Amino acid sequence: MLDIRFIAANPALVKKDLEKRQDREKLPWVGEVVEKHEEWKELKGKVDELRRSRNAVSEEINRLKKEGKGIAAKVKEAKELPQKIAAAEERLQQLQDRIKFILQRLPNILHESVPVGKDDTENKEIRKWGTPKKAAFELKSHGELLEQLGLADFERASKISGTGFYFVKGDLVKLELALISFAAAELEKKGFTLVEPPLIMRRTPYEGVTALDDFENVMYKIDDPAEKEGSYLIATSEHPIGAMLTDETLDENKLPLKFGGISSCFRREIGSHGVDTRGLFRVHQFSKIEQFVFCKPEDSWKIHEELLNNAEEIFQKLKIPYRVVSICTGDIGTVAAKKYDIEAWFPRQNTYREVVSCSNCTSYQAVSLNVRYLNSKTGEKEFVHTLNSTAVATGRAMVAIVENCQNKDGTITVPDALVPYVGKKVIGR
């Protein structure tokens, strides 16, 4: 979330940003949250004063008793104070709830380079890599081919789990593990610490890393009587890793902290037709390696480009053509200040499709989670910046490999970078 002090100091900037995002219905909230916060601060001071008065009156009554003096007036005052405190505390809670509601829904401030646009059709292409292939024969859909080769089973998975799940089998399991091992090795070479996070998160930390208004409808909620606030299966390892350092003050000399999250991810939303419903591209459960960084604010834009470069290098080594796009103001979502997507080339579909998302969230998550570092120059505790980027989402990467490396005889050539992990150059025989 945005720091309330930042909003109070820059209301015009926050409103201008909402206009860019075409999020005009939230414009009145900017003034409201500042007003509510001022009222909260003033009332908090009065409550503290009432509590001090209650203690002082109690001491005064004891003193008067010892001196044998009348205490009726003070006893009456003492009886009235708890009611005044309770009424003020109730109003404080109302204000706090409303402030929290607004802050969790006001989006991050966009970087000036984010292209203005109404939806994904106005995202801006930055560059391309590789030459998109045009097959000399009719390519089979990846789902159909993998089932024919006995490397995946969607029908039986649907029977026991529903549409959007799958069994991966044989050499395709090796290919998936190869992608994980390869990407993990690439990240380790660049100083990332590998992390396997919990797959379940409570609601409160989840609200710190993402806007549940944007995300909750695609998440699996767990009804656990022991957890009153509710829990969720994680949608990406970004979320538990981001929440991992909640309420901590980090050592400036150890920043940036770079983590490579390896996990299963769970999302309820899938596509409604074609390649999405019978295949590996858009599914309810998938494996992903995620880059996540905590850093000083002055370093975050340089690191944003580094994370993108890391993901590009992985797809270059897989020899999968792709393009990089900068996500426009109408498509970027609440948390990121700037986001790139890498879209791989899918020759059977004759189009580019997203395989990587790379975001700089600046201090937005850190404010919610209260993750700071001690600035040695100012002596002040300041919020860190957080960034995240896909390294490899294995399902989508495997679809890209199947389409780009499919052979006329129905086999699939393993990218050279993965051969040492798979143990063979061709699968499907």
Image: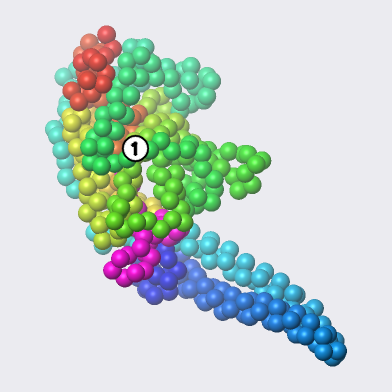
Q: Residue at x 82, y 89 (%)?
A: 67
Q: Residue at x 56, y 74 (%)?
A: 40
Q: Residue at x 38, y 25 (%)?
A: 279
Q: Residue at x 31, y 46 (%)?
A: 258
Q: Quadrant of residue 190?
A: top left
Identify whether 184 is placed above or below 16. Answer: above
In percent of width and height, residue 319 lies at 18, 29
Q: Position of residue 272 (x, y in %)?
A: 43, 33
* 91 and 399: which is toward the camera: 91
Residue 40 in sight in this render = yes
- On screen, residue 409 above or below 345: above
Residue 262 is covered by the magenta coloring: no
The image shows residue 372, relative to residue 210, as above or below, that is below
Front residue (pair 384, 230): 384
Q: Which element is circle 1 on?
A: strand
Note whether residue 352 is visible: no
164 on left or right of 421: right
Quadrant where the C terminus sits is top left
The amino acid type found where label 1 is placed reads: Leu
Residue furthest to the top in view is 429
Residue wearing tag 1: 194
- Compared with residue 62, is residue 115 higher up or lower down, i.e. above or below? above
> Where is residue 181, by image quadrant?
top left
Tally of numbered discs: 1
Position of the N terminus by quadrant: bottom left
Q: Which residues are magenta?
A: 365-389
